[in-house]
Amino acid sequence: MELRDLRYFTTLAREANLSKAADALGLSQSTLSKSLARLEAACGASLVLRLPRGIEVTEQGQIVLRHAERMTTMAKDVRAAVDASRQVAQDCLRLGVGLGELGEAESLALSQFVSREPHARVDVVQASSEALSAALARGDVDCVIGPTPEVVPPDHRVTPLGTDTYAGVCAINHPRRDRLRSLAALVQERWAVPRATTRVGLRLAGLVHQRGLPLPKVAMRCDAVTTLLSTIARSDCVGCFSHAMVQAHPLRDQLMILSIEEIRYVKSLVFISREHNADLLLVRTIRELVVANRKAVA
């Protein structure tokens, strides 16, 4: 039984079509068919049913599929561990940061990292927490700063970083500032929001739906939090951001955090890395700097 055949089988099961799976793998249909035949022979069972419009994985095939997914993941982990062992020599740290999580403490930690490791390079990738979790699992990033995941894989190491409080934000000279005392008032305003789906955004949408309120008009969508807050500071737009984001912004003196308890949201943040690279020099250095700076800024 070859790992290659197991990997091909996981793709075939996902696509449920021999032609589509072959295209996804960059193989000919005959090559994929031979691979499937080898795997079925090794298992001593039929793994798929051939239907007019594709294939269906059999009960025995589902058993093989579960093991195949674990084995291919383990193979990726082996490769990731080997790649991680070269990290110090390569002098490159790939840091994933959740959208809007690059606050004052994280910015200070990055500047200190660059000073402390003059021969290293840090690549910062900002994306949604879901995208970063997937990137960490694939080995595309070495570590992640973001919200506490709902499920922590057993091969991940999690370091708590404290909490961030999210609240409504508007310009300090907003023409209707004194009226912005409830969610009902806020939804009447124009909003500046991230393009990507975030937990804070989903929570706000749920609150709006529960209260039977109209969806607010979105004036700007942008994944750069600095741009969103700059727009809010210079216009009549509103948004929902953490206190840390506001305090780290150059125009913080032109921004106002609204005291609307119903939309106040406390989010726990963590530093996550895979166990196989958690103690490597660059990962350990950035983790220690982030933890220290968040304590200092708090």
Image (cartoon, rainbow, N blue to C red):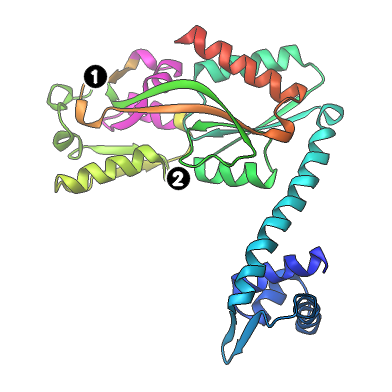
Residue 242 on the magenta span: yes
Q: Position of residue 5 (x, y in %)?
A: 78, 70
Residue range of the region highlighted in magenta in the rendering: 227-253
Instruction: Say whether disc 2 or disc 1 marks the residue closer to the N-terminus.
Output: 1
Q: Is residue 132 above or below residue 68?
A: above
Q: Nearest the camera: 6 or 272?
A: 6
Residue 52 on the magenta span: no
Q: Is residue 219 visible?
A: no
Question: Which of the image's four quarters has the C terminus?
Answer: top left
Label annotation for residue 196: 2
Disc 2 is placed on an element classified as loop
Q: Nearest the camera: 235 or 239?
A: 239
Instruction: Between label 2 and label 1, give the one nearer the viewer.
Output: 2
State the residue at coordinates (42%, 46%): 197
Farthest residue toward the bottom?
52
Question: Which of the image's four quarters has the N terminus?
Answer: bottom right
Disc 1 is placed on an element classified as loop
The quadrant where residue 2 appears: bottom right
Q: Position of residue 253 (x, y in %)?
A: 35, 12
State the residue at coordinates (69%, 63%): 68
Q: Is residue 9 above or below residue 280?
A: below
Q: Is residue 18 above or below residue 171?
A: below
Label annotation for residue 104: none
Mark 1 residue crowding within 10 angstroms, few (<14) / some (14–19) / many (20+): some
Q: Which residue is mark 1?
A: 173
Q: Amino acid at mark 1?
A: Asn
Q: Position of residue 250 (x, y in %)?
A: 45, 16
Q: Is residue 188 left or right of residue 256?
A: left
Q: Position of residue 85 (x, y in %)?
A: 83, 33
Q: Is residue 53 left or right of residue 187?
A: right
Q: Are marks 2 and 1 in contact (CB under 8 Å)?
A: no
Q: Nearest the camera: 26 or 118?
A: 26
